[in-house]
Image (cartoon, coloured by chain):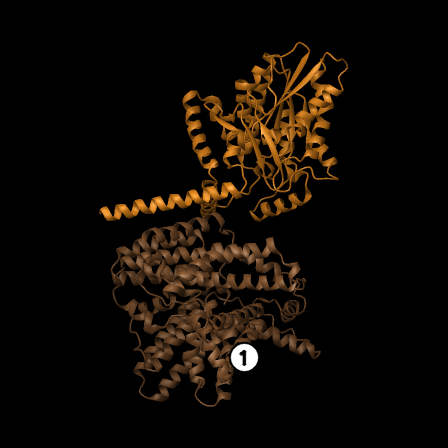
Amino acid sequence: MVFNSLHFLWFFVVVYAVYRLLPHRGQNWLLLISSYYFYAAWDWRFLGLLAASTMVDFTAGRLLESAATERWRRAYVAMSLGFNLTLLAFFKYFNFFADSLQALLATFGVPLDFVTLRVLLPVGISFYTFVTMSYVIDVYRREIPATRNLVDFAVFVAYFPHLVAGPILRAARLLPQIETPRRVTREQVRDGLWLIAWGFFQKIFIADNVAPLANMIFDPAGASHAGINVLLGVYAFALQIYGDFAGYSNIARGTSKLMGIELIENFRFPYLVRSPQEFWRHWHISLSTWLRDYLYIPLGGNRGTSGRTQRNLLITMLLGGLWHGAAWTFVLWGAYHGILLSLYRSAERIDAVRRWLTARSSLAHGTSWFVMFHLTCYGWLIFRARSVAQIRDLTAAVLTAFQPSALDVSGLLVPLVLYATPLLLVHAMEARADDLLVVPKLSPIVRYSAYAATFFLTMLFGNFGGSEFIYFQF
Amino acid sequence: MRRRARHVLLFITVFLAWGGLFEAALRQWGSSEAAPAFQGLFTGDPLIGYRLNPGARTRFSTSEFDTNIAINHQGVRDDQEIGSKRAQETRIAVLGDSLVLSVQVPFETTFTEQLERALNNGRGDRETSYRVINAGVQGYGPVEELLFFRQVVRALQPDVVLVTVFVGNDAEEALGSRSKLSSGQTQAFRDSLMTRMRRVVRRSMVLQVLRLRVLAATDRFRTRSGPPEPPLQTYAARPAPRIADGIALTRDVLSQLAAEARNAGARTGIILMPARFQIDDTDYGHLREIVAQAGGELVRDAATERFAAALGDLELPVIDLLPVLRQAKRGPGLFFDENVHLTPRGHEVVSQALVPFVRDRLLTRH
């Protein structure tokens, strides 16, 4: 079931109506049943996987608390992590590694066709395995106590607003909200409704409308385009993936707010940043903080030599790229961001560069923003490309065949500007107030205008035949 | 409480204001039949629901055409009045829907006007003259055409009535308007109210889009309770039972119309008009795929064959335009790309086919 379907609308209306009538424990049971229904609507056969993951990590948490020695604690955490990583490796990466191995051996003239198993990717597996792993690691680190209530834990794992595409929640933040009675405030309803409306706008008006612009450049692979149009196609994809994913996160946060449960912000003006470090503090925040806390810091973080820090950054981002999907383009994208982070870290040591990056002048701000935005966009070119060969071809088109005179004004430029403008206007208001929920706090006439404009733009010009959310595949 | 009421009022006002703003913007920069200029061509009618507005004039522009449209005071498309009938004048009224009205092309290009010119050019003596009346109205089906004949066309004293049956949707159109036949004024008035409401929605470009969104959403929802019905049922290999009912009703209506025309001294002929995809292979491939995806099977000429079979026993002259258009499909397009109506060349082909049909089978006294 996807958020942008009538099925979800009816599902949520019914669940929410019953939810508001039930006491706290009843609400948790309802959330559990409805979350499993939500997941089963995609494919009920994988419910067992979700339940198994929940049981294993709930048990691991309980065992960790009752373990007599550190050795046993290490054994329990290793078992839990081993289980989750095996699950992820098998369902998400089996095909990828099998195909890669076949291709590698084939280049040496060794045909290998024993691997014929086609594994179906269970939706949301990358998200919920990361959620459960973080819980077990936090209990192991004694940062949180293990929960004693299986229903509460199962709700924490399967909670439908975040189940299939995040945000990747931490137990320390979500479990207490599940364990204790909730009160839905008027502000939560107001903000929640706005987040839902804005999320749909980002998905239906922006992402699904600019998707064909990006597809013009990326599909089919091998078609030749002038560099300037490639650049616009990449801008379109940058807008698409942001609208798609941030839209999903906003709908998730909004529906959750209506139920009195606060989820974290997952995006905060990621295209307004001026450095790679900042980008990862503003883009898919729940994943980047997860990678920081459970991978980068345990690897040593920035403690130790500069070389070790750069190695840690590279490993973290490589794995972060691979988390997005089992394809070499994602690995390259991760490596690209790892290299960017390392280079910026090295460049910051140079006085002139540091001064430039921290300067308050508009010129310095503008230049560093421009550079970072285009570095991010190049990352999206790698991410969206259908093959390494396409990355090469599109890069060559931008660098060697820019051809400004071939600019596709009516097919690319004008629609891109039209679809981006409302987003920029709202972001300008939000950035000025440094508040992602500034719209519901504006004066009534401005607020209602924003609501009405969002409604009409979505309904009149939205692409209602659009696709599923991109991050479902991850 | 009062504060909340003020907020609600303000919210509604702002919402309506934005709705108005989008409406104005769409009317200014978007072109569609919802535009007030186009809607001004129609007026309410207590029996039929609506008809052409006598004396209306407008210019209708889209990306594909730019046409001046005039409705004369008799209520049919023509830039001249239809005066009293002269002794040697033969009048031919062509009933039908948008494919006859043809707002996409200039009046002189319509097949009715081309037919009139061809008949007048080919006449044997100077005394006789032919007047072809374009009695097509956008959105009409067989039932409305019968009512329009009674209300408007009969008074124009036609000698020949040509009824254009659009095989693509006339079965469903007839069924949808059946109540207009059997009912008295009350039912017709109720229909007229519905029609008026529909016209309010049709006049607003914003409301039209919202209506389509709601329909799309509810259609999708309906599919959850049962399998979806593939579109283009008149062409389906196994059509819904209502299609047979609709074709039978069309037959009855045409029989009634022919009888009333005969009583008024006119002969009746039938034109079977095919849908664009019956001629255009690309369009056909596309639609066949859509129908297949919905679980159906599209039979390209099924609607034409079904209507031809049903209307055959009326013993009225019938011309099927399908073979004519199919034969002429080489060269410039017969239909517009973005709408399903005839291009100027399509009108030319149709008028050339109609000339011998009208002259030999309807004007000649047997």
Q: Is residue B57 above or below residue B215?
A: above
Side (left or right) of B26 relative to B94: left
Q: Where is residue B190 in the image (x, y as percent from the top left)?
A: 41, 27
Q: Mark 1 lies on which chain?
A: A
* Residue for badge 1: A339
* Res. A103 image quadrant: bottom right
Which residue is outermost to the bottom? A305
Q: Where is residue A79 in the image (x, y as percent from the top left)?
A: 42, 81
Q: Is residue B13 above or below residue B242?
A: below
| A137 or A295: nearer the viewer | A295
Residue A18 x %, y %: 30, 54
Element marked by disc 1: helix
Occupied quadrant, residue B71: top right
> What's the residue type where badge 1 is placed?
Ile
Q: Is residue A91 in view from this perspective?
A: no
Q: Which chain is brown?
A: A
For this orientation, the residue located farthest to the left is B1
